[in-house]
Structure formats: C-alpha cells, structure tokens
Image: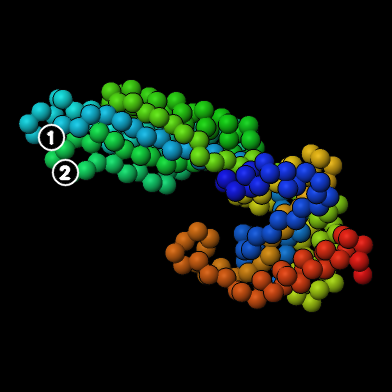
Amino acid sequence: ARGARAMIETGVLDDADYLIAPHVGVRVTRTGKIVCGAGGFQATTKLDAVFTGRNAHAGLEPEAGRNALAAAATAFLQLQAISRHSGGGTWVNVGTLEGGSARNIIPDRAVLKLETRGETSDLDAYMQDRAHEVLRAAALMHGVEVEIEGVGRTISAQSDPELAGVISEVASDLPDFDEVVLEEDFGAGDDAAFMMERVQRRGGKSAYLVLGTELPGGHHTSRFDFNEEVLVSGVKLFASLVCRLSGGA
C-alpha cells in the first residue's frame, strides 16, 4: 500500500483523462466473466509497533526485566477485542509477531505488524485510533515503551459509472467475455484507489475492473494460481479501450 502514492507524488497522473486499473480473480472466479466498475474498496492502514523493554536472566533476576514480548502478545490479543463499528464493516489483523533471543532471557524487544480496515476511510480511522490505544495500553501494562509507525495505507474509492459503461460496451464486443457485469463491490483494499481519486479530483474518470479467473489456491497464499489465458484477454481489452477512448476505430 505504498507504490501508488509514490507515483502520484511525481505528478504523472496530473493531466490524465482516464485511469483504468485491473485485477484478476477477486470474487470473480470464472474465466470469461468481467466486472467493469468495481467499488466498495476497503480503506486500510498498515502499522508497525516496536516494543522496547529491558532484558534480564529469567531465573537469576526476573524482576530486573521488562518483557517486551509479553507486551506485544497482550496487544495481539486485545486488538482482536476492539469493538466493531455500527456504521459499517471494520477489521483488524496482526500478520507477524517477532521477539526474543533465547528461552532463558526476558525479551527486551518485540515487533508486531498489523493492519486495520474499514468500509470507508472514516471507519478505518476509528479502527486505527483504537489500535493505537490498545498498543500504548499494553506497553504501559508491562512497563515498556512502544513506537508506532504507519508504513502504508489505502483509501476507499468508487469507479465512475460512465467509464465502467464504456468498458462494458468494449468487453461485450470481445469473444473472450461471456458474462459482463457493470458493477460489483471489490471487498478488499488497493492503493490504486489513490490513483483513482487523484484523476477524479482533477476532472478525469477512473474505473477499476476485475478479470475473472479460476483461483484454486486463493489470493495471497502459497497455493495461489490462476488461468494465464486471462492475461491475453486483458491485453485485448486494454488495446480496444485505448482505441475507443482515444477516438480510434
């Protein structure tokens, strides 16, 4: 959730009339189906929390230690207890927890990497605020320090219906697609939302499309796989869209 913002800051999109961002597979798990205007992007914030305590021998002088790993473990569990928001979907996930150096040494350092999510940017902000409170409280409980760093985020976004309609018309003319859906919720986050928002804010149009493919292993797993024929279909679609949007045949 960092690449798109870096590109935006170069100004590369400041005069763009159209932006079309593609993905494969997300909730569209059949080759031949296409969603032309995905919306419902989850806003998300990525956080690293570094807990710093004091190491000590666990048998000789445990009272001299301040257990950073215990603080991080407490935070891990209590993050799951954040109350969800009545205004929409909210999520939190801890992806990694690392700490300690040996079984007989009280750990003086632990790193917890997590993310918050919300159906909207405001809902994600609520989850992020609560996560900060939990992390700081866990550190205080165990007498350690915590440094919280934001390492990436995305915002919510929506495809322009007019551009999604153009994509639908072009896709319907290609034999590669036998099911053309105008709009569906994406149900995840993507930093392409920043790019979409920048183009829209400056008067252009943006759309996010999803090309269907079988996913025997699911996204972001060690078993991920997909039907590579969808790449050929995607190239055909984008070539046709360039011709259509630029006034060509």
Percent of width and height locating residue 71: 31, 32
Residue carrying label 2? 103
Task: Identify the residue at horizontal 8%, vertical 34% (top origin).
Answer: 59
Q: Nearer the viewer, residue 133 or 239?
A: 239
Seen in the image, is 79 located left or right of residue 90? left
Task: Say whether marks 1 and 2 touch (CB < 8 Å).
Answer: yes
SS class of the residue under badge 2? loop
Q: Classify 10 Å Cα crowding around label 2: few (below 14), some (14-19), many (20 and above).
A: few
Q: CA distance from mark 1 to mark 2?
A: 8 Å
Seen in the image, is 173 located left or right of residue 69? right
Task: Identify the residue at horizontal 57%, vertical 45% (top origin).
Answer: 2
Percent of width and height locating residue 208: 72, 54
Task: Identify the residue at horizontal 47%, vertical 38% (top origin).
Answer: 47
Height in image: 55 above or below 176? above
Give the mark nearest the N terminus, 1 or 2: 1
SS class of the residue under badge 1? loop
Task: Identify the residue at horizontal 65%, vertical 60% (top origin).
Answer: 23
Q: Which quadrant does the C terminus fall into?
A: bottom right
* Residue 58 marker: 1
Q: Nearer the viewer, residue 133 or 204?
A: 204
Amino acid carrying mark 1 in the image: Ala
Height in image: 156 above or below 71? below
